[in-house]
Structures are given as structure tokens and as C-alpha cells.
Image (cartoon, coloured by chain):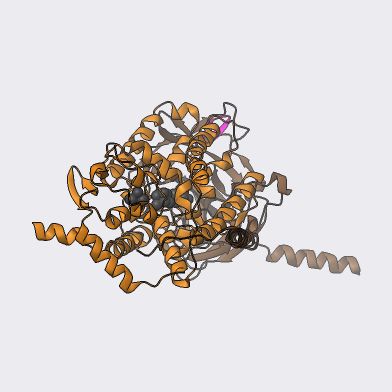
Chain colours: A brown, B orange
Amino acid sequence: MKLTYSLLAAFILCATQPALAATPLWWSETMPHPDPGGATRHSHGGPVEIRRGVYYKNLWLRSGDGPANSSHVTSFDGAMPTLVSVTGEVQEIQGGNLHGTYGVNFAMPDEGFYNLYLVAESVSDGTRQVDAAKSEVLKHSCREGHDHVKGLMAPRHLDTIPLELVRERMDAESFHTTLGFGDTVTFQVLHFGRPVAGAEVTLHTARGWRNTVRTDDTGHASFMMIRDYYPPWHEFERRYRQDYLVTAAYSVDGNGESAGVPYQSTRYLASLNGSYYPSPRDYRSYAYGLLLGVFALTVTAVSVYFYRRRRQRRFHEVRFDEKN
Amino acid sequence: MKRIRDAINGVDLRRFRFWLQLFFFVLLVYGGYLAVNLGQYLPTFSCGFNDAGRGGICYLLPLQHQLAMSWRTLFGWAGLMVVQGFLFFALWFFVLNKGWCGYVCPLGTIQDWITSLRTRLGIRYSRYTEGQFRRLTLIKYLLLALMILIPLGIGGALLPHDMGTPFCDICPGRMIIPMFTGDFSQLTIDFSTKTTTVMTALGLLVTGLFLGGAFFKKRFFCFFCPMSALHYLLSKPALLRLKKDGAKCTRCGDCYRVCDMEIREIADEVKDPRIMQDDCIMCLKCVATCPEPGALKATFAGITLFESTEQGFIKRMNQGHNDEQHPH
Ligand code: SF4
Ligand code: SF4
Ligand code: SF4
């Protein structure tokens, strides 16, 4: 009897579960293996290579549900990646073997955000899956100054991308702003440039935590970053950079054919990678700071007071009137 | 022409300075809200940590950043950028010389405001003994040397990277100036590493010392300021100058007694006309207090801007007695 109930429960569960979607493709800054030549430098936009003063970015294609559960894609034969430069120039760039797996390397001569896209399509069981992997990469060097930053902050999108995630800017965001634990990050989902309501948006953190929400009427979905880093104090790094992955899924019914294979519905899957850091709230203390400041102030005042008392007993000073 | 000159020489310097300092304070601390941007090579403490309001950036911040670049970069193409930055800094400085300290520096102005508060409370001020003065005045050169050597050591991987801007870490400007735009985030101890814990703790100790010191001692911090040391290395060819005609000086000592920086040479030196010393902040209080016509003067590109006159002295003495109470 007990067994019959269990089987029934299992059947109901399977019947209500949506068909398991193929895992998303996404761009990652993480090398397939540790940096062999040590050519990578840290910059405000994450790891870069600097050759003759020009910044170059390496990105690798990965597949899987979040940074903790993804593998690097060894080869990819689909469409070429598209790069949108800071000046808005759209160009196809060559991907290929980069330190062992599929990746791209591109120059970032200008200050600001570069968007990299890769669109892939496949049909399985009558469902067309359209993957649109995006990465938004910042190029910033403090040596270029900071006067130009405000004009370059606005996020951009491409109307030709089937499903795109756009990260909204935080309040007073600059090239130095980083996302920290406890901060809220908001994304907008666009279907060929138009906001999509009801799309399923999932945020995956570096250690595998995830949360799914649906977009509102304007296509927006927000998440609060959770604390995801618990080292012993002596190993703590305040600039510990962790990857997050955010994906958006949106399905549309409609018959069609892709490369000669018919389908009845299309599932769009967008991905966007990003990074986050420990929050200053985790390692900065006002209480100790103010305590020390007040302590130093008090010691100074008390020392001056006693110094003056000691000196006054010895001789009578004739002082100049500072007012004149 | 003579009337204009008399009017300038008879100016109420205290009031003039107060308003000019206030103007520059607003410009450098709140100018950012009005899109004022004077660049990042200013020879004054327009603190870069005051993100929202700054009207320009104190040169010491980019200087330390630049010097902390890896040696390969620093002694390669980036070296030119350091030289270029220094040239911009020097150009700004040549215009006003140490007048940047007496009239523009927000941290100097804050110290003057603290002095006014003390005066109003009727508490007397402190002075150093000559021996203390001679020793303390060297500290700023030591700080300047450390401010250059530590980032260089970081660039050469000899020192930890989280010490990147060592002077900013302990500069009271970092804690105090952003507070004027409502940013209190610098009043914290950063426990993320041992180095940052020590440096931010030192910073807050220095801030407490700054507030207490400036209350009892006029321009307390300026004695130790590495920016002032850097200024002095460049001050000889600057356009604004302080000059003394020793033949007209009676060595009454008024200028020395009024000097916030306790510069004895201003009264004692009668041979060298270029009287400016390394601690001088070019406040020109000495010129305003000198009763001997033409003994002290401030010139700009050789043109006399402001000089000591008897009438000016008498006028200011009367003003001083009318609108201030005695602190004793
Ligand atoms: S902390 Fe001090 S030295 Fe650094 S930028 Fe601010 S005012 Fe300048
Ligand atoms: S010496 Fe004083 S006034 Fe001059 S830069 Fe330093 S703190 Fe400012
Ligand atoms: S010497 Fe004159 S100008 Fe210089 S700090 Fe003293 S009073 Fe001011």
C-alpha cells in the first residue's frame, strides 16, 4: 500500500515537472586551468592582458547551471561571436581555441563597456532552443582619468538579439563601483529589444546558490546578492572576485522550421555573467573607528591640559594677544 | 592708482581671507555638484575620497597610485605619465606658490575654523619651543619620503599591495573632508587585512590628533604636511612671492608673533629679500601686521600686490580692537 502511494506521488511529480531544458551557454572570465604564463593583470573590469598599453580581454564559453556547475566548451561551430564596442561599432569576431577550450580574445582600446554576444540555435523534441550568451566587459584604467565616466555608464542592448539581459546601473554607479553582498542588482529582459513580462530569471552565485523570479511588466527582475564567501580571517580578501551567472528563459508557441527541422514552440535562453565582492559592511567597523578617533582626541586634550598646568606653576608667561 | 593701492594695502586681511577661503572651500568640496572639475593634479588637499562633491583631486592621490605601478610599467611607457602629472601639478603650483595653503587648501581652512572656535571659547593657544619646532618641521620631509618610497616598494613587490596609498591612509583629509558632503564611510577601521587594519586605525588616531591639535595649535597639521614639503621643493620659481626689505625692518617681531607657523626668520632675517621658509603658508598675516612701510610685501610676477604700510597697520589694529575680544 505504502509503495503504491509512493509510486503515485512520483508519477504526479514527474507529470507536473517541466521538461528539463538544456543548460545555458555563457561567457566566463575563468580560464580552463590556472594562468600558465602569468600574463593576466587585474583591472577595474576584471582580469585583462595588457600589451603595449592596450587592454585585451579573454572570455571562455561555458555550459551549465551557474559557475559551480559548468564546464568549459571545448569547441563551438555555430555563428561567430558579435562584439559591440564602446563607440557602438558592431563586428563579428573570431572565436577559437584559447588555452585549451573555446574562447575569444579582443582588444579594448577605449574606456567604457564592451558587449559580447553569441547566439546558438538547436531543435529537440519539437522545441527550438535559442541561446543568447552575453558578456558586458568594462575597460577602465585610472590613468585615463575619470571625467568621461558619467557619459559612458548607460547600459546598451542590441535590437537583433532574440533574448537579452541588461544589467541596470546602481545609484551613482561609476567605473569603480562593485556589487557586494547585500546589494540589490536589477536586470531587464528584452526580446528583440522589447521588454518581456513574465520571463523566468535565475541568478546563480559562485558557490551554487540560486534564486528564480519572474520579470514585472517592464521586464525587470531584482535580486539581493547573498554572502557567499566564508574564509578564516587571515585568508580573507576584500577584493575577492566571484562570478555570478544570470539566465532568463522565455517561451513562445508557434510552428516553424530551423535548418529543415520542424518545431512547435521556441524557448529563448539568455545568459549574462557578472562579478561580485565582499561587502565593506563585512569588514569595516564604525564602532572601533569612532572609538579610536575619540580616544586620540581625548588624549590630546588631556595632555595639553596637564602640560599647561605643569608649566603654569613654574613661571608666569607673558603671551602675545593673537587677535592683533 | 594710488587710491587703489592704498585701499588694497589697507584691506581687512582677516575678513578678505575668510571669504576667499570659504569660496575655495565651496569650490573644492562641493564644486563636483556643479560640474566643476579642475583635474587630478591640484597642489592642495581637495580630497579625492570626497567622490560626490570634489571640484578637483589632490595630487598626492594619483601620485601614490602612479608610483605603485609595477616597476616594469613605471620605468617603461607609464613613466611619461608620472612626469606629465608632475608637470601639471607644478604649473598649478607656480601660480599661487604657497598661497594654495594660506587661501585654498580645505584642510588648512578647516584648521583656521577650529582656531576661530577656540578663540570664541576664550581658550588660549599653544606654541612650540624653538627646539620642538626645529625637530617637528622635519617630519613632513620624512612623510614625503615615505609617501614616495612605500608605493615604489609596492611596485617592486617588496611591500604588500594593500598599502597602496599610504599617506592617504593616514591623512586626516580622507576622514574629514568627505564628511562635509555627508559621507562618513571613511570613519571606519578596515579589518580585511592586517595592513589595512593598522593603516586605517592609524588614520583615525591621526584624525583625533588633528582635531585636538588644531584646537590648541594654529595650523597644527601644516607642520607635518608632505604636500607642504613638496611645495617647498618647487617654490623658488613661483610667481607669487613673499619679499622682505631688511633695511626697512626694525625687528619689532610683530610679524613673528602673528605668524601661525611660528616662522622666526620672518622677523630675524634682514639680509635675504626672499624670505619665504618651508613652513610658510603665505597667509600674508605678517605683511598685514608689519608697521614699517614696504618692509614686507607680496609680489606676483614682480608686481607688488600687497605691502606693509603704516596706514594699513593702524587701520587693521583699530579693526582688530573693535571687533574681537581678548582671549585671556
Ligand atoms: S586623503 Fe589626503 S592626501 Fe589623499 S587625496 Fe585626500 S586629501 Fe589628498
Ligand atoms: S600645509 Fe596645510 S594648508 Fe598646505 S596643503 Fe598641507 S594641510 Fe593644506
Ligand atoms: S611668514 Fe607670513 S605669510 Fe608665511 S605663514 Fe608666517 S605670517 Fe603667513
For the question of whether residue A304 can be seen, the reply is yes
Residue A265 shows up from this direction: no
Residue at the spot 56% in from the left edge and 53% down from the top edge = B206
Q: Secondary structure of the magenta portion, mostly?
A: strand
Q: Quadrant of residue B163?
A: top right
| Residue sitting nearer the eye, A110 or B64 | B64
Res. B74 image quadrant? top left
Percent x, y for residue B268? 35, 44
Residue B188 lies left or right of residue A173; in this view the side is right
- The structure residue drawn at horizontal position 44% and vertical position 68%, both measured from the top left corner, is B119
Query: Based on the displayed image, in which of its 4 quarters is residue B87 positioned?
Result: top left
Q: Which residues are magenta?
A: A98-103
Closest to the observer: A73 or A11? A73
Q: Is residue B235 left or right of residue A41?
A: left
Name the outermost residue toward the right: A1
Q: Residue at x 32, y 68 (%)?
A: B320
Q: Nearer the viewer, residue B149 or B322?
A: B322
Q: Using the image, determine if residue B70 lies above or below residue A267.
A: above
- Image-based side of A230 in relation to B21, left or right: right
Number of numbered tags placed on the structure image: 0
Q: Which is nearer the eye, B182 or B218? A: B218
Looking at this view, name the residue that lies furthest to the left. B1
Pinpoint residue A90: horizontal percent, then vertical percent.
Answer: 35, 44
Quadrant where the N terminus of chain B lies?
Answer: bottom left
- Percent from the top left, x then y, of residue A289? 61, 59
Residue B309 as seen in the image, left or right of residue A314: left
